[in-house]
Image (cartoon, rainbow, N blue to C red):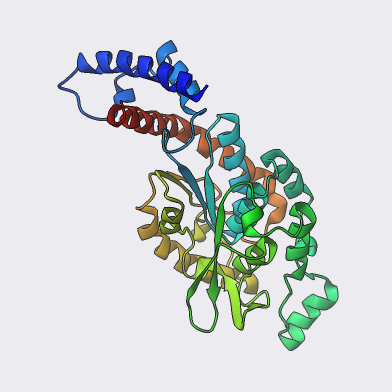
Amino acid sequence: MQKNKISALSVIFFLLSSITAAFPQQDGPVFDRVNPDSFLTQYFWREVVTLAPPKRPKVVLVLGGGGARGMAHIGVLKVLKEEGIPVDAIVGVSVGALVGALYCAGVDPGKIETMSEEIGWDKLTNLSAPSLVGMIISEKLLSTENMEKYISENIGNKQFYELTTPFACVATDLKTGEKIIFREGDVASAARASATIPGVFSPVEYRHRYLVDGGLVDNVPVDLAKMFNADIIIAVDIKDDFSRNNTTNMMLILSQSIYIQAGMLSQESLKLADIVVTPSVSGVSTYELWRGRECIDAGIIATRKSIPQIKQMMMDRTFKWLLEHP
């Protein structure tokens, strides 16, 4: 069956080669020179997505941090699924680690969307009137134990090697400032550590380390996609426009300070991505989980704009593989 697919692609390859040979003076991607709506191109695309790497490029998705704004990642995953774009691995940080862990464990984007409509800080933390009083009076931080339990309830006590899609996430060692990369162990506890905002939530103790949000050291860890031998890296950057935020709230000031630093660090990292999807979620603060619908829609809109570029890149690189492996 696979040989038949390759044969069919070889025929298309020959036809496309003939078309592009007619324009030898033109450089650039092959599918820039072919009508994207043509039967030939559409057929080629349908065949490309049935192939496995290395015959088609390996696509790795990098989901950045940003608190409630990260609900946009759900919209990104929904569109990629609808368009048949394969996601061969995910690297996540903070909220990107939470969404990525669910998806890589086999939870459908539609189900994650439903979960997001029910979620609140009370399900992710020990947030309550007494705990808030404790924060104010005794500076006692909130616990994210419930976050780990919530993930486990939805994916089970999965280890990384049990995931249906390869996954990695990042946390920060609060004592040393090291970037801690999780690729093994318990998935729920790793995602929890990656999403523990310092100064608000208690650090997660792990193997004699105290771990907090990975966004402190790398808010869009594009370089880690290379661990999965990525051919195409799609990064989702959910940065905020801080000028819109009201900075009179203590928790908002703290999270905004973190994300300002994270945003500056991300600029270099994003240069390593092939495609950057930037949902318009400016003005949604870290803690506004009730604005999830707005963020999901922003993720959908931004990803739809990137679909032609993603498909073109995938077809071009498959075309190149056929050229090099006649």
Q: Residue at x 84, y 77 (%)?
A: 130
Q: Is residue 139 above or below residue 2?
A: below
Q: 162 or 243: which is nearer to us? A: 162
Answer yes or no: is residue 319 visible. yes
Query: Could you say which quadrant of the image residue 147 lies in?
Result: bottom right
From this viewpoint, which residue is outermost toward the bottom?
A: 138
Residue 41 vs residue 160: left or right?
A: left
Residue 23 vs residue 126: left or right?
A: left
Residue 137: give x, y in percent of width and height: 76, 86
| Number of numbered discs | 0
Q: Is residue 304 above or below residue 75?
A: above
Residue 39: give x, y in percent of width and height: 44, 11
Answer yes or no: is residue 249 visible. no
Looking at the rendered image, the quarter that the C terminus falls into is: top left
Q: Residue at x 75, y 88 (%)?
A: 138
From this viewpoint, which residue is outermost toward the left?
A: 25
Q: Residue at x 78, y 76 (%)?
A: 132
Residue 9: give x, y in percent of width and height: 40, 20
Residue 133 vs residue 218: left or right?
A: right
Q: 15 or 308: which is nearer to us? A: 15
Query: Could you say which quadrant of the image residue 192 lies in?
Result: bottom right
Q: 294 or 18: which is nearer to us? A: 18
Residue 140: give x, y in percent of width and height: 73, 83
